[in-house]
Image (cartoon, rainbow, N blue to C red):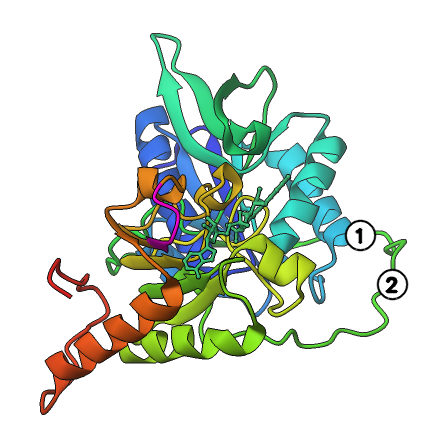
């Protein structure tokens, strides 16, 4: 590996997000002619980081389970020594706790939930873009201090193609202070079979679904399409029928097919589904905003349309193996 001046760092506790950030970091590192490094902890992944683009992996020794305060301190210690230009952090729950703490320790800026990162003009100024005002406007921002700390939501960028390659491993022993917050207990969260971010088909219900039990028809459709169930925020936050939701304040999803049933299409919901390849909307109101972003719109009562879709699919699959595969979107004729 060439000894380049300057570094871009990538950190996320989620492997898939780390790989996505390495893919984007690689493009920037090439343009800036700097080294791309991943940060991990003892016992964490290293070899695959190289395969997804890292030139170097820093292995922080002496850290236990994730604790935002101690991880921020540890990363800040090595950042002060090695002065990276940019630090890319996955905008996961933990990443969101870590990034601002790290920025405060390094007395630098932190741009959160960025959806675009690029260099602009002759000076190659680092620019980020992110949705603001509840997803109503896209802000373009630049940094005036280094390192530039940027958080990026999972699935914002494509995971790069894995290539067998070697890199440098740097073990760093860090001594951090006692955290001021002590975790007494952690409980496993109840979630679906698969992360919503990873689902290739999502059948999502909104306030148009009248009762929790009625989600069973959506689930039947999801089972036929090997999909996952999702919902809008009122279903989770107001009615408490599900623990998580999709949108600006919830999960950002990128399935091949997103079927919105009884969802009006408010901007905060749309902010979470923009990356879907195909959006199908079922809504009885022909003026519903969701139709503005839908690739296919069905004006009708979801209690009639969804069972009709299930029956159509049953007829189609009768005697055949189901053919809805991971990366193959539905075609127009269902
Ligand atoms: C700061 C902030 C963050 C937010 N974050 C999110 C977020 O992350 N995700 C999110 O979803 N929302 C979020 N919201 C809330 C958002 O503004 C909307 O209130 C919410 O998305 C509306 O959910 P809905 O479409 O399910 O319900 P509604 O807006 O009530 O729409 C229900 C729809 O169902 C249709 N309908 C009714 N009956 C039927 C039927 N039988 N068949 C077919 N259609 C039917 C109606 O025509 C209507 O269009 C946020 C709001 C704020 C202020």
- According to the picture, the residue beneath numbered tag 1 turns out to be 176
Residue range (magenta)? 282-286
What SS does tag 1 mark? loop
Q: Position of residue 83 (x, y in %)?
A: 59, 30
With 314 as the anchor, is 270 left or right in this view?
A: right
In the picture shown, does residue 170 fall above or below 150? below
Q: Is residue 83 visible?
A: no
Can residue 228 be seen?
yes
Q: Position of residue 141 (x, y in %)?
A: 52, 19
Q: Nearer the viewer, mark 1 or mark 2?
A: 2
Residue at the farthest top position: 122
Specify whether residue 66 is painted magenta: no
**Is 220 rendered above or below residue 260?**
below
Going by the picture, which residue comes out furthest to the bottom?
A: 319
x, y percent for residue 18: 45, 53
Label ID, residue 182: 2
Q: Nearer the viewer, residue 255 or 215?
A: 215
**Residue 200 shown left or right of residue 173 in the figure:** left
Q: Specify whether residue 284 is painted magenta.
A: yes
- Rounded to the nearest angstrom, the CA distance separating label 1 from label 2 is 14 Å
Relative depth, front residue between 144 and 59: 144
Identified at 69% across, 33% down, the residue is 103
Task: Please say if the residues under marks 1 and 2 sit with CB atoms less than 8 Å apart.
Answer: no
Whichever of callouts 1 and 2 sits on the residue coming sooner in the sequence is 1
């Amino acid at each position: 590996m060439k000894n380049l001046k300057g570094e871009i760092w990538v950190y996320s506790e989620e492997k898939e997000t780390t790989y996505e950030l390495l893919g984007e970091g690689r493009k920037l590192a090439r343009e800036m002619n700097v080294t791309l490094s991943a940060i991990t902890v003892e016992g964490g992944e290293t070899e695959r980081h190289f395969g997804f683009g890292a030139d170097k992996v820093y292995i922080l020794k002496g850290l236990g389970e994730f604790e935002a305060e101690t991880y921020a301190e540890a990363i800040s210690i090595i950042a002060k020594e090695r002065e990276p230009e940019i630090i890319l952090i996955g905008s996961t729950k933990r990443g969101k706790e870590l990034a601002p703490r790290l920025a405060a320790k390094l007395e630098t800026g932190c741009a959160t939930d960025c959806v675009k990162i690029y260099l602009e003009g002759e000076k190659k100024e680092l620019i980020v873009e992110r949705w603001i005002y509840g997803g109503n406007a896209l802000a373009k921002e630049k940094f005036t201090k280094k390192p530039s700390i940027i958080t990026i939501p999972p699935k914002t960028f494509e995971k790069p193609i894995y290539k067998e390659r070697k890199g440098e491993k740097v073990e760093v022993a860090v001594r951090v202070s006692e955290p001021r917050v002590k975790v007494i207990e952690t409980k496993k969260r109840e979630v679906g079979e698969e992360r919503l971010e990873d689902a290739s088909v999502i059948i999502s219900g909104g306030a148009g679904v009248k009762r929790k039990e009625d989600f069973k028809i959506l689930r039947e459709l999801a089972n036929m399409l090997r999909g996952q169930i999702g919902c809008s925020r009122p279903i989770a936050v107001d009615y408490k029928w599900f623990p998580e939701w999709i949108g600006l304040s919830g999960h950002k999803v990128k399935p091949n097919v997103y079927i919105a049933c009884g969802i009006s299409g408010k901007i905060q919901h749309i902010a979470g589904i923009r990356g879907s390849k195909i959006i199908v909307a079922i809504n009885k109101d022909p003026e519903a905003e969701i139709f503005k972003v839908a690739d296919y719109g069905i004006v009708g009562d979801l209690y009639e349309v969804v069972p009709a879709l299930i029956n159509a699919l049953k007829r189609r699959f009768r005697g055949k193996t189901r053919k809805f595969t991971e990366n193959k979107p539905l075609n127009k004729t269902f």
